[in-house]
Amino acid sequence: MFLREKRLKTIVEFAGTLDGVDPDALSRCLRLTRLTNQMDLDVDRYLAGFGLSRTHLLILQAIFHLPDQAVSPAELSEDVGITRASVTAGLDGLEKLGYVVRKRNHPDRRRVTVTLTAAGLRFTEQMLPDHYRSMVGILARLTVEEQETLLRLKQILGDGIRELAEARSP
């Protein structure tokens, strides 16, 4: 038995001693969490093949699909649903790769606009079609009905996690 399977068994056995904790439900939750974590690692490995992180992809995709391909870091944060600090770190990496540039606007030099460079535009134009085909190919393993069910279930779980986070945050 692998270490993580032993750990899962130990956790579930402990949960069986607790009031209000269904050990079988906890086992399913932990297996789902493990599966989700493994999928995240696989996505990270896939994107690393392009020299990107998930944050890089979100930023490139957002800028690429804007009509004028220019946006502020705060707008990027809001649009892609990540913190401003994550956007800043992502932009730092994308600037090092030569894919984006940050420019100060005149006359308000406090405002920064992010745009794709020519290299960033070329890279994104080449990368996104293959990426989108890959995403569609993965989902094609499920029927449309299964895809819709998966979306509904993920929404329900996401709502539960959000409510838990909001209840626990100061």
Image (tube, rainbow, N blue to C red):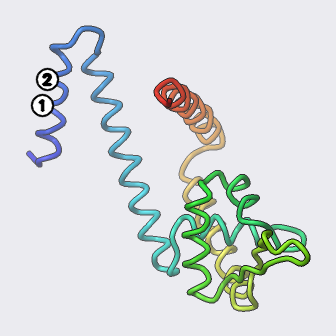
Q: Amino acid at mark 1?
A: Thr
- Residue farthest to the left? 1
Location of residue 71 with respect to 147 vertically, above or below: below
4 and 141: which is toward the camera: 4
- Residue at mark 2: 13
Residue 10 marker:
1
Return the residue nearer the eye: 77 or 19.
77
| Residue 29: x %, y % from top left | 35, 31
Instruction: Tell me the SS state at disc 1.
Output: helix
Left/right placement of residue 25 relative to residue 163 reads: left
Q: Which circle marks residue 162 in the picture?
A: none
Number of marks in the rendered image: 2
Real-space CA distance between mark 2 and mark 1, rounded to the nearest whole angstrom: 5 Å
Answer above or below: position of 33 versus 162.
below
Q: Quadrant of residue 131?
A: bottom right
Picture coordinates of residue 70 (x, y %)? 82, 73
The N terminus: image quadrant: top left
* Amino acid type, callout 2: Glu
Residue 99 figure quarter: bottom right
Asked if residue 57 is positioned above or below residue 161 in the image, the reply reads below
Query: Where's residue 61, x and y in %?
Result: 70, 68
Q: Is residue 112 left or right of residue 163?
A: right
Circle 2/circle 1 CB separation < 8 Å: yes
